[in-house]
Structure formats: C-alpha cells, structure tokens
Amino acid sequence: MTPKTIETTPYADQKPGTSGLRKRVTVYSQPNYVENYIQAIFDSLEGFAGKTLVIGGDGRFYNDVAIQKAIRIAAANGFGKVLVGQGGILSTPAASHVIRHYKAFGGLVLSASHNPGGPEGDFGIKYNIGNGGPAPEKITDAVFARTKVITSYKTLETDDIDLDAIGTQRVGDMVVEVIDPVADYADLMQTLFDFDAIRGLFAGGFRMTFDAMNAVTGPFAHAIIEGLLGAPKGTVVNGTPSPTFNDGHPDPNLVYCKDMHDLLMTPEGPDFGAASDGDGDRNLIIGKNRFVTPSDSLALLAANAHLAPGYKAGIAGIARSMPTSAAADRVAEKLGIEMHETPTGWKFFGNLLDAGRVTICGEESAGTGSNHVREKDGLWAVLLWLNILAVRKQSVDEIVREHWKTYGRNYYTRHDYEEVDAGIANTLMQELRAKLPSLPGKVFEDDLQVAYADDFTYHDPVDGSTSSMQGVRIGFADGSRIVLRLSGTGTVGATLRVYLERYEAADGRHDLDTQLALEPLIGIAEQLAGIKARTGRTEPSVIT
Ligand code: G1P
Ligand code: ZN
C-alpha cells in the first residue's frame, strides 16, 4: 500500500479559533475540507516520522467519517503509530492524558465541545502538542498560513479501519492501536482523589445527580461515579453518548441544565448536581439551594485542593482567563502563591503548567483543571468537589458562604449575544476601542470611577510571546469590571460576550440577586457599547 498524493485547492476559511477549527458539518463535508486541514497541520510540524499520534473525539456526528480520513492521512505522512479510543471516542481531557501517558508526539481531538451536533450542527478538529495541551498560537498561525496555499495531501487507499475491537492492526506501514477510552483516565483520577472517602460519602446516603448530556462523559461517569465510587445506579443521567446529543445542546449551564437546577432547589432534590459538556472538559456544579459560578468554583477548588491527596503538598499557583472573576486572586494572595491572568482559551495555560508555576487553572466558561493534564477537565472538577465535601462534611452552600465570609464575594455574570451580524459586532468593538483612552477618570452612576480602560495584551512570562487584542477591559476604582470580547468559537455570525463583575468585601452583603447586584454595570456597558441599539436585540441570548 503506497501513499498517494492527491491534488487539492485551498479553502480561505480554515483559521483555527479559540479552540481548534470549528465549523458546521455542512462546511466540513465539502470535498477535501478535512483532508486539507489535517495535511496543513502535519505540514506545520516537524520530526514526527515514526512517532505516535493520538486520535479521539466526542463521538458527535461526522466523528466516524473524519477519524477514518485522519488515520489514513497520518499513515501516509509517516507516523509510526496511531492510538485511538474504542469507537473513535476519547473525551478531551482523556485525550490529553493519553498523549502524556504514552509520550505521544501529539494528538488530534475531534470535537466542537459544547456546540450542538448532527448533520446541521457543528464539528471541529484541534491539534494538541506533546504536553497534551492545545497547540500554541505559533503552531495554529502556521497551520492557517499553510491552509491558504495547500496544493496536495497524502493518503492511503484502504478499507475502513475497525475501531470497535480493542487491539492492534496495521494500516500501511503504521500501527493502529485501539484502546479502552476510560481505563487510563480512571486510573489517573484514583491517584489524585481519596476514592475511599468519596465512597464513604455515598455509603452514608449522600445523593447526587450527574448529567452527561448524552455526550462523551457518559461512559466515564458510569465507570467512575457509579462503578468505582459506588453511587447508586441512576445517579448518572443521559449517560449514553449520541451523535446528535439527542438533539440537545451539550453546554452545562443554567439554560440547558435548567431542570437539574430546579431539582436542586427543592427540598426533595439531591445534595449535589453536576454536568459536563459534549467533549467532557466543562463542568457545572450545583449544591442543594446553591449554584456555584465557575469563577467561584475555581477559587473554592484552589482554596481547598490540599484536602485531596493529589494536591496535599499545596498548589504552586493559580491561573485564570482574563474575563474570569478575580475571586481566585484573593485565594492566591492569601496562600502567598503566584497568580496569572491569561487570554481566553486553555492553550494559554500550557506554558505556566509546564513550567510548574501554576497547579490549578480556570475559566468563567465552566472550565477548571490542573496540572494532571493540559486541558480543562469536567469530571476532575466534579471529583475534587466530591473529595472536598467528603472531607469537610459540610454542604456546598455552607462551604460557599464560608468562603465569601473569608474572602468576600465577586458578583459575576456573563451576557452573550449570539449570532449577531459580524459586521455590526466588529464595528461595535472598533468604536468601543476608540473610546478607551478617554475613559479613565470618568465617573458613572455617581460613584463608579473608571480606573483603567484597555484592550488586554498578554505577555507570556515563560516563552516571552505577546498576544494582543484579547478583550476590552473597563476597570473601576472599587474593583468592578466590564469586559467585552467577541467569541472565537462560534460558527455563525459573531457572538458578543459581555462579562460583568463587582466585588463585595468579606463583611459586606453576600445575599443579593446577581443580576440586580450588577445592574449599574449592565447599564454602563450598554451606555458605552450601545449593544441594544446596534444589534436590535432587547436582551442577551444567554445569561450565565
Ligand atoms: C469559549 C469560552 C472559553 C473557552 C472556549 C473553549 O471561547 O469563552 O473560555 O476556552 O470556549 O471551550 P469563546 O467562544 O469565548 O472564544
Ligand atoms: Zn468542551
């Protein structure tokens, strides 16, 4: 079987976004669209001949088609081995672990995360490097440049590769090994958390519900939560992965997990509710009568991580994406450890984690993780919460309230305006940027004085690289903040994200309704950016 070189013509729109190349399945199904992109990735890498590539996806519609193409192209380009999850499945954190554990050269993660799936839904391809994390901008920029000039790709002519049977086979000169997607990941979790203590929690009658959202974490949650941890059958709901997520939207937030949220707010409801997204890297945490915002969850996990065996020596530092609330900063200050503010997207945490400067990272978009892999990890966050609950023997609500009494509360919300006309969104951002120099010193709503206004630029302290235009920040003297940026993961039009935050001191009021507490800032954001007037929208599409 000799590799064949097939002529192709470039596509102009293969620019990787916040997390890989995400497009509608209809876009991905165009002739050679997948082939061009994967060949462009391989053309941008050096030194992989004979090495191992990990491939796995979240099982969404088109995963099975793309994975066959990917394996053939990998074989024709000279990889020595492909490690693939059974059925083509690996959650994003499990893929990151497999890359690290087997010291692979890198990996292809096939997913569009929390975006809907199906023939009319989204698909995505992301390249991860040997540390298990998303490729840095240096590589994604090179891939984009290559997609614009590509003229051919290499592949093999083979029958479809059987991805259902665990074991080893050959494709041309390359070995394909199909592995159990759950086993290595479950082993890793047992090195980090006190499974006996969590088993004791369930044995004592603690009740939980985990919504796998018909997506990739189903088999992982069944094996770990109901299997190893002994939670009763039925604890995991929507646990069978479906290529269309049963026509659902696998984004674990209060919109798409409203039923679970409402259940947790009733006296008969369980003690703890959690969910994960399409590819298993996001998490939602709700205690009885207490939703935990992702920004608070990051701060709480960092403050309590030492209660889990994997972190008992303490954590080296914390990193959060810029729009994430500053709640974690107060924990880092108290612990006397490093704190880093990075642009949106997990790829910016990789260097800090590799350099040992931070142990725990998080984003306001429901992503938390640690140095155990180089992706955010939904089940990891759930297990760390369970470990903390088992040790502290308090409810989620009690733990959250105690935290605020110690550190103060950062009221926080995000308003998303989805599928806005891209031209309107870009003009809005440009005109807002132009206003920034005039804002410092101005006073809004009687007492909110602007302390700074800029477009965030990140200087990576590890490799010295600079990333500019990462989101407009308007900071006020009392620590309040408005952030606006355009999403880099949407596939239709533009999504405008408005992030709002206000700090209330440890002895202040912690029981206000979040939207009411942030009302003055919501008004200022509107006044400065004119979102409603420009977009014609009367309210955000999603509030988290
Ligand atoms: C969104 C989130 C970001 C996250 C990314 C991938 O990106 O905001 O925090 O890393 O999804 O899950 P955005 O659409 O805002 O560019
Ligand atoms: Zn995801």
Image (cartoon, rainbow, N blue to C red):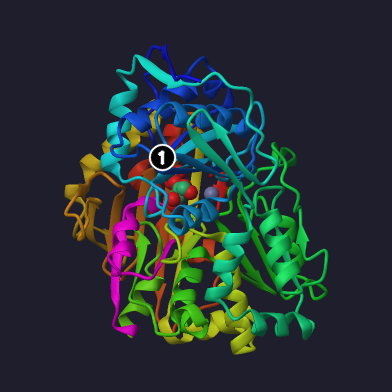
Taking the image as drawn, is residue 274 in sight? Answer: yes
Left of 173 or right of it: where is 455?
left
Taking the image as drawn, is residue 284 in sight? Answer: no
Residue drawn at point x = 67 percent, y = 50 percent: 256
Element at badge 1? loop
Give the answer, above or below, for where 51 lies relative to 522.
above
Report the magenta residues as a range.
335-362
What is the x, y in percent for residue 68? 58, 29
The residue beneath circle 1 is 488
Quarter of the picture holding the C terminus: bottom right
Left of 115 or right of it: where is 367?
left
Q: Is residue 360 magenta?
A: yes
Q: Camera-side residue: 349 or 519?
A: 349
Q: Camera-side residue: 121 or 102?
A: 102
At label 1, the amino acid type is: Gly
Left of 538 or right of it: where is 447?
left
Q: Which of the 4 quarters of the picture holds residue 330?
A: bottom left
Q: Which of the 4 quarters of the picture holds residue 453?
A: bottom left
What is the x, y in percent for residue 237? 77, 57
What is the x, y in percent for residue 472? 30, 48
Give the answer, above or below, for where 14 lies relative to 404.
above
**Cβ at disc 1 under 8 Å from ligand 1:** yes
